[in-house]
Image (cartoon, coloured by chain):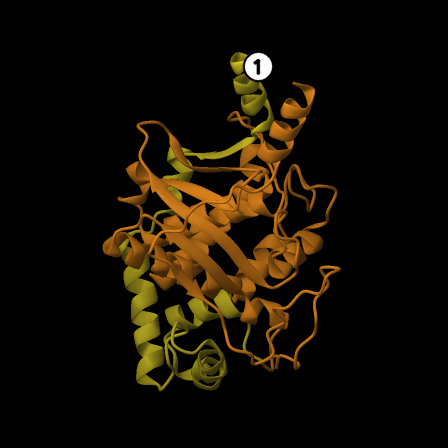
Chain colours: A orange, B yellow
Amino acid sequence: MKKLIAIFLMMSLFSVSCNKSDRGSSSKQDAQGVPVIGDHENNIVPGPPIPTPTNSNLPALALSFDTNITLVSFTAAQEEKYNKAIEIVKLVVATEKFKNDVVNFTYNGQKAFIDNKSRTNQQIYQTILDAAETLKPIKNNTMDLEVQLYYAANTVVGYTNGGTRRIWVNTKFFNSFKENSVAGNLFHEWLHKLGYTHSSSSTPTRPYSVPYAVGYMMGNIGKNFL
Amino acid sequence: MKKLVIILTLLTSLMAQASIDEATMKSTEATSGEIKTSRSCFKELEILGCRHPREDLDQFRSCMRNVYSSLSPSCQKMVTQLYGRRN
């Protein structure tokens, strides 16, 4: 009995292996120096140096940020829409505005997010570029996710939980959202995969948490790429 | 036993939800004016020989900086905001 409970607890905390659909969307850059391989100690194995554009304050990882996203049970039209949102994510991460907005984020007179895991804004920005999800703690500069659509007649745009690489997106909102808003929600949920949290209830400070604040940044900057 | 397992599952499964905040989502949704402005700016850049960042981000960035002075004021403002000041 005790063993069963212990096993069950362990299983629910770790990732759930799900059958992947026949539809998938992934984009992986060929190396022009993308450090995508992690060794057994989860360190970045450096590849060839990534050229940094001149006259830029952006780190190279912002330009090489990539995605590895599997879409589960999407129609062709839904997949096309979601892929556009994924492209927007990459474009936004590659802007100086995104970097500046994250690094200079201010709440209550201080440059800090709510529920920031004791990290500075610069450190939070770096974790975004490193893209080491909790369930796949390799700094591969790549957003690794599974996405599945569902419908619920409530106010939840999407959700995830700590034991899976999957996020769920509510078609009640997905169907009417423009791609920049889809990108914002995608980034919000992905930031949970990086370990950032927020209050479950709508408190006055929740919008200043990392998932909410940076998700909104993604949506706002993403407007420029529609 | 079954009830205990169900309760344990609920307790250990931490759900992180993104709920809609109507006012904020409205501000995030792009207006037709914003879309028109950005698309006209990228059109300007395309005419000047810059590929869209979706096609080739590196080429776009270096090209954009080269043609910056030829852009309309609104387009200059947009690319400066997105990609920083042209040195």
- Counting labels gives 1
Residue A206 in percent (x, y) is at: 56, 33
Type of amino acid at the residue the image marks with label 1: Leu
Residue A174 in percent (x, y) is at: 32, 44
* Vertical side of A47 occupied by A1: above or below: above
Residue A140 in percent (x, y) is at: 62, 63
* Vertical side of A134 occupied by B56: above or below: below
Image quarter hosting the C terminus of chain B? bottom right
Q: Is residue B86 visible?
A: yes
Local crowd at mark 1 within 10 Å, few (<14), some, or many (≥20)? few
Depth check: B22 or A132 in front? A132
User: Left or right: A6 with respect to A212?
Assistant: right
Q: Quadrant of residue A45?
A: bottom right
Depth check: A27 or B5 in front? B5
* Vertical side of A199 occupied by A49: above or below: below
Residue at (59% x, 60% y) in the render: A99
Task: Determine which residue is flagged by label 1.
Answer: B4
Image quarter hosting the N terminus of chain B? top right
- What secondary structure is marked by label 1? helix
Residue B27 in percent (x, y) is at: 39, 44
Residue at (57% x, 55% y) in the render: A101
Q: Chain of mark 1?
A: B
Q: Quadrant of residue A200?
A: top right
* Vertical side of A119 occupied by B37: above or below: below
Q: Is residue A58 visible?
A: no
